[in-house]
Image (cartoon, rainbow, N blue to C red):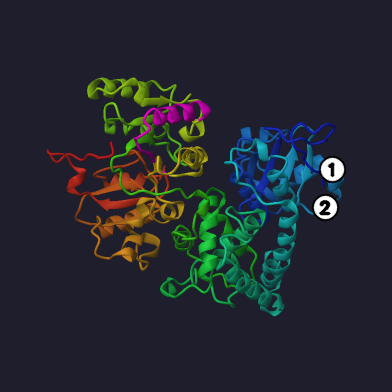
Amino acid sequence: MEEVMPPGTAGAKHVAEAGRYHLFVSGVCPWASSCRSARHLLGLEGVVSMDVADGQSGAGWVLLNGTACSPWAATAASGTPFYLHEVYRASDPLCASGTTHITMPVLWDKHLNIIVSNDSWAIVKMFATAFRTLGTAPEGVGLGREEEVDAVHKQWSATLLNTVYQAGVPLMMRGPEARETTSDEVYASLDELEALLATQRFVMEGDEPTAVDLFLFSKLIRFDVAFMHCMGLHGGRGGILVPDSTDQSKAGTQLGYPNVADYTRDMYQRLKPCVDWSSFTQYYRSTKLLPPTAALPDIEYVMASADQPHGRGGETHEVDSYSWMGDRVAIWAQSPKPSYTLETQRYAQPSRCIPLLRPGQDLIVLPGAHEGTREAWEFHRDTLGLGEEQAVWTSGSLYNMDDDVDDHIIRQLKEAMTRQPDTKFLLIPYCPTPNFVRWAQPLQDEMGADKLAIFAENQEWIEKYGDKGILHRHMSALEMPSVIELIDPSINVPRGFVCTTQAELRGARKLLAGTKVCIKPLAGATGVGILLDVSDEQIETYDFPLGPVNLEELLQLDRDADGEAISPAL
């Protein structure tokens, strides 16, 4: 296979550039999913287009609704199924002889109409090297140094990545009589991984995952739903995320691989958009280990465990923390999290703190080029008697305000602090994301932590407690205490349940019968997505536009003086 070279490489056949390449992957294939994860982690979604196959058919990998990739884009327009073998034949007509193995993933060059590579490890490395500068991932997020990563990948390929299939596929195809000793190698490798992850966050030392972690994660996330049962891997210490995905009565049992479980959760919460849970059951189509009446794994039960806090630190993004303002002057810099994609969040998040400004004292960073934010500022400025110099405006050219803080903004903040040599300042973000730390930490280092404190919890705290899911038990795992219960069972919270499906919403509604309820997205902000006094009809048609939600009892604090439902956030 061939190789893509970095942008500007003279004379190269394949050069990295946006819009030129297309990635074909499958949700069920762990190797293909590793490429998909690399594309996501490095922020290459706008650079390399992608199709996810619906599965295997009698004619091989198929995209039932066609592909938008040239030169076959007409299949998407007409909804005609498209088969991966057509990509191979277009690249090499000799494929028609039947001697070529049609595999996922495939990296396709749309300019030259040729396959660049169908080697997952090679594709991931190309994304991490040749394509790296085209992605939107923050500086410092990469996939490791090539020579070191190659060696570690080779080690884990021999001991875990490939042995799962070597142990399980013969059993799937030929039944229990095909059992091989390689299953013992899988269990020994999991023991080794458990010991390693007790001392470090990722497989290789460092603050960010490497390419090796992507490949390991793609196997571990499938273990409970697919490998354990359809490949007969019932030995070792049990499941990864749950004791047994087909038997929730074992839910209270201590996990056999607690470090591997938290590592898997850590990676999952970075790569959640790349995981097609429903595709994992495709393994059961070909297994001969289970009778047709065998219970299938409870996917939502495993998903609920994957969503639990992982507690594996966040040392890269820590900043000095303060829990009070004292006599400091505030600098509000309330950029939304990168995951907040709605325009209302983009602008409402930074501007909602304008009313908190004290005339002639505090500063606020606001996104420029937005009429609504300007109007909000002018209203509060005139009403509260604020000074024009208290607002620091970015260009407004980037979606995430933190990414729009440039040298001009930094210079204004430094000048404001320098003009008051005896005054101490407190920089207050909405959340200390890597985007915020990128500019805030150097500014604090230059001004000094005594002059400029940062009011923020560290990343580990946020990962554990940073959304509304800590308040309630998950409908898919009602026997598991909520995070709040684990901290202190006496803490009063509204009655409610975390839900990810309509079936769970209906179940939660029954448990909350006799009281009015509200829906609150776990990752919502600025009141976005909150539905108050929800009807049964709304529950039946709710489509989770912002992901998992809490279904809670409607409390008095959610009503105004006349008893009408309101949201304090709005």
Secondary structure under tag 1 reads: loop
Q: Residue at x 67, y 40 (%)?
A: 132
Q: Residue at x 25, y 61 (%)?
A: 491
Asked whether disc 1 touches disc 2, contact meaning CB atoms under 8 Å apart, the reply is yes
Q: What residue span does the magenta drawing correspond to?
A: 406-431
- Compared with 187, 380 (above or below) is above
Residue 119: x and y, percent?
A: 75, 51
Residue named by callout 2: 100
What type is the residue that disc 1 sits on? Asp
Secondary structure under tag 2 reads: loop
Residue named by callout 1: 92
Q: Nearer the viewer, residue 144 or 424?
A: 424
- Compared with 277, 366 (above or below) is above
What type is the residue that disc 2 sits on? Thr
| First in residue order: circle 1 vs circle 2 | 1
Residue 451: x and y, percent?
A: 40, 40
Residue 51: x and y, percent?
A: 64, 42
Whether 426 is among the magenta residues is yes
